[in-house]
Image (tube, rainbow, N blue to C red):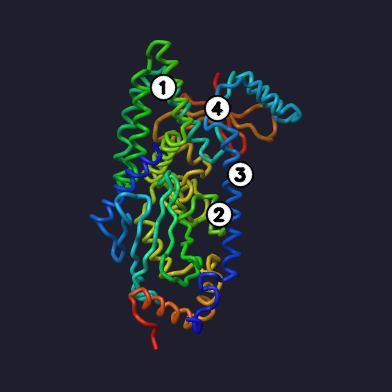
Amino acid sequence: MMAGSALRRLMAEYKQLTLNPPEGIIAGPVNEENFFEWEALITGPEGTCFEGGIFPAKLVFPPDYPLSPPKMQFICEMFHPNIYADGRVCISILHAPGDDPMGYESSAERWSPVQSVEKILLSVVSMLAEPNDESGANVDAAKMWREDREQFNRIAERLVRKTLGLPPPE
Amino acid sequence: MADDAPSSSTFAGNSVDSSINQDELIMKQQREIEQEISETIPLVGDLESLQTLEKEYNEDPVYMLKVKDLSAKYKYIRRTRPDGNCFFRAFSYAYLEHLVTDKQEYEKFYEIAKNSKEILVALGFPQFTVEDFYETFMEVVQRVGEHAGGTLDELGAIRQELHDKFNKQGYSDYIVVYLRLITSGQLQTEHDFYQNFIEGSRTVTEFCRQEVEPMYKESDHIHIIALSNALKVGVRVRYMDRGEGSQVMAHDFPEGAKPLVHLLYRPGHYDILYA
């Protein structure tokens, strides 16, 4: 029953995302043979250091989705307080309550079965715009975000250009 | 790249790796503990005599007095897995089990259950997030309806079917999710009333997102009040703790309603009681 329910739900979400795509986000299964692995393209939010970039990420869904959340990982180079060096995204909506090694605030929004891929991707866009520098996914990025914003912005600009296939700025 | 990026932004930074490993380790440990609990305690157990509680508290005079009091009022207990979902699981099991022998109550409940999805959709829950949970829930409710008030054999068979479904993780958790959504729907519909129960500065909607809708979040009075009101089902909770006296205090939800479901509360956990 579990994997069947998960598949039904993922197909419904895909249809919904195709009919009503949120601004700046494209997402869907890598191929329609396997609905449990999606790719997403996220546009860097306007007015932030990630503006203009198009960041590809991969979402992997568990067989008991949506009881459990998917895992999400950027497949381009990223430098951000809430993204691990290997691209994995660390935000509270991707965690069930109790699943809590990062010490999120107890008030942070957690995974629940009425969340969705769309909600996750919108949260990731907010995360790009407003990093949570309490989270230790990338300690160096968090430190630089706090203490040397100019340097952080320079790295972000290079990453943005990289996603567009452009050479680093002069 | 080496000019502007610190070493850890490359994909093999040592400091980052060690922090990942630690988090992973904690998560792995948590999962192992959860799994250990899962394997020893069924989602919903078999009927047990209350004497099993006496054995549990053999050397605890405070609890022993209360178990004695409880034994005078109830004969059996059915334990549930302590996974944070126990109130919802215990409540739905006990109530559906009651409906098996109460056709009139069933008819009343069926209408409430059938209309519950529309209330959620009207509150803004996307259809696709509610649909599957609603259908699984209604499937189980209808199975009970088909056999409610039937022959003894039929009743035995439907009880067994309920027990089996409640012990299948998928079915059981989908029912729990749907009851959480009904609870959330009730809190949001009557938000002016329920706001008074919420400590701190959270709104009712925030409270629902954080404390009601996610699985494994434990239930408090406010969850019980909301669910019993939404479904119009009387619940009596017997409180057994280290408090003074030799009695297990009873609390009825909603106040004054005839209790059809009896639950035993021990700090952090609910089981089902039978007279």
Q: On the rendered structure, is B161 left or right of B22? A: left
Q: Residues within 10 Å of mark 1 (few under 14, many from 20)?
A: many
Instruction: Classify residue B40 by image quadrant.
Output: top right
Which label was assigned to residue B33?
A: 3
Is mark 4 in CB contact (under 8 Å) with mark 2?
no
Q: For the residues tagged 4 and 2, is the chain the same?
A: no
Q: Residues within 10 Å of mark 3 (few under 14, many from 20)?
A: few
Residue drawn where x is 33% and y is 35% of the image: B135
Query: Which label lies toward us, 4 or 3?
Result: 3
Position of the C terminus of chain A by quadrant: bottom left
Residue B196 x %, y %: 47, 47
Residue drawn where x is 37% and y is 18% of the image: B148
Say if B80 sits above or below B222 in the image. above
Instruction: Classify residue A59 by image quadrant.
Output: bottom left
Cα distance, mark 2 to mark 3? 14 Å
Q: For the residues tagged 4 and 3, is the chain the same?
A: yes
Cα distance, mark 1 to mark 2? 39 Å
What residue does disc 4 label? B45
Q: Secondary structure at mark 1?
A: helix
Say if A53 sits above or below B244 in the image. below
Query: Which label lies toward us, 2 or 3?
Result: 3
Query: Which label lies toward us, 1 or 2?
Result: 2
Q: Amino acid at mark 2?
A: Asp
Q: Chain of mark 4?
A: B
What residue does disc 2 label? A100
Q: Amino acid at mark 3?
A: Ile
Q: Chain of mark 3?
A: B
What residue does disc 1 label? B99
Residue A160 x %, y %: 38, 76
